[in-house]
């Protein structure tokens, strides 16, 4: 059993700290844990600099951890690292598998190799993907546990790259004792997930990111919410403030080499999600029933929570109703920012429409 790690007065690196989860984690650590310094590396490929807190303890480095010049700027006495950077989304990775490899796989390998000789490092927490290990089913699912078997057949390069990241981390733990902890994400939602954030990534999902920010925006505009496969797919939605607490719990109490689900443990269908969001925004436009996505075999899934509760003392506490309410309020308050980031991609979105 490892000793409990503290974030107080620690030097912390957040890779992907300008992104949705990374920026929320940064704000949470500053508010609750009094760190000595937070270093952020982000290439702003799918994020916005406005997410980075303006705080004297925060040091921002623009670039990728795959770049040795960027890694050379880091202090050599980092104590905690959160590796949250990724090439955003399944659909973007399907459109450009090479870009996914460059931004998801090589980045992890370079970071782990750079940190392998670090003397002060107490923990590196890796953002693993629950979707990569979940059973592929449209029947009644069972909760996906941390020891679920892993298939060699996957729906997207994103899923593959997230598993490869776990494998590289496991290697550096067993070979070099890199204190590597896997935080298995379920579907995170909440404030600071900005539609259109970052640079063009080849598909309309550059703008229409994950389902909740997309649904909230469309619902606020009075548009029909699109329900793939009739909305019968299900996911485990966890509010980003709970996710930030879970990541901290992984850093404080997680055992190197182990995986921990950061999940709500609740299954919500996309149809029910649409109803919840429309009820909160007052949108009365009927939903738009669409066929199933041709690439997605993971129709229904949710995460098991027992291990994280027992080993980390972590349980998600914010209900989806309350989390959606806070996210709707944030979206309303940040409408100008979202309009601006979406507008950056208008020409490419129009070209896609003409070609489809």
Image (spheres, rainbow, N blue to C red):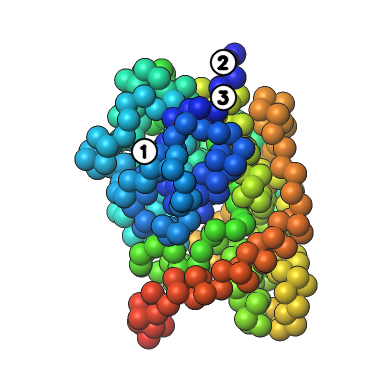
Viewer-nearest residue: 97 or 112: 112
How far across and how far down the image is residue 88, in percent?
44, 56
Residue at label 3? 6
Disc 1 to disc 3, C-alpha distance: 24 Å
Viewer-nearest residue: 197 or 105: 197
Disc 2 to disc 3, C-alpha distance: 12 Å
- Say which element carries label 2: loop
- Which quarter of the figure has residue 344? bottom left
Viewer-nearest residue: 249 or 56: 56
How far across and how far down the image is residue 335, in percent?
56, 73
In terms of sequence position, does the residue under pointer 2 or pointer 1 come before the other?
2
Horizontal placement of 84 versus 248: left or right?
A: left
Residue at label 1? 108
Q: Are marks 1 and 3 in contact (CB under 8 Å)?
A: no
**Mark number displayed over residue 2:** 2
How far across and how far down the image is residue 26, in percent?
51, 44
- Say which element carries label 1: helix
């Amino acid at each position: 059993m490892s000793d409990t790690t503290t974030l107080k007065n620690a030097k912390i690196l957040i890779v992907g700290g300008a992104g949705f989860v990374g920026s929320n984690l940064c704000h949470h650590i500053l508010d609750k844990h009094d760190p000595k310094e937070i270093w952020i590396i982000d290439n702003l490929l799918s994020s916005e600099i406005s997410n980075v807190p303006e705080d004297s303890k925060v040091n921002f480095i623009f670039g990728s951890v795959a770049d040795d010049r960027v890694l050379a700027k880091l202090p050599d006495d980092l104590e905690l690292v959160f590796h949250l950077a990724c090439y955003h989304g399944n659909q973007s990775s399907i459109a450009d598998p090479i870009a996914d490899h460059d931004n998801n796989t090589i980045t992890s390998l370079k970071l782990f190799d750079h940190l392998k000789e670090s003397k002060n490092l107490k923990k590196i927490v890796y953002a693993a993907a629950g979707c990569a290990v979940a059973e592929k089913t449209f029947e009644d699912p069972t909760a996906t546990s941390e020891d679920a078997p892993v298939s060699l057949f996957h729906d997207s390069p994103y899923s593959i790259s997230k598993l490869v990241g776990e494998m590289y981390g496991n290697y550096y733990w067993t070979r070099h004792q890199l204190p590597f902890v896997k935080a298995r994400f379920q579907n995170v939602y909440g404030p600071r997930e900005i539609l259109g954030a970052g640079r063009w990534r080849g598909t309309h999902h550059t703008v229409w990111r994950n389902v909740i920010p997309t649904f909230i925006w469309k619902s606020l505009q009075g548009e029909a919410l699109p329900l793939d496969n009739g909305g019968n797919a299900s996911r485990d939605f966890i509010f980003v403030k709970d996710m930030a607490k879970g990541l901290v719990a992984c850093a404080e109490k997680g055992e190197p080499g182990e995986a921990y689900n950061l999940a709500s443990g609740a299954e919500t269908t996309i149809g029910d999600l649409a109803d919840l969001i429309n009820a909160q925004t007052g949108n009365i436009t009927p939903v738009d029933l669409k066929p199933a996505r041709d690439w997605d075999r993971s129709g229904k899934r949710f995460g098991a929570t027992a291990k994280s509760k027992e080993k980390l003392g972590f349980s998600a506490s914010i209900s989806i109703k309350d989390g959606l309410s806070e996210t709707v309020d944030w979206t309303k308050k940040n409408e100008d920012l979202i309009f601006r980031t979406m507008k950056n991609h208008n020409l490419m979105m129009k070209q896609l429409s003409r070609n489809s």
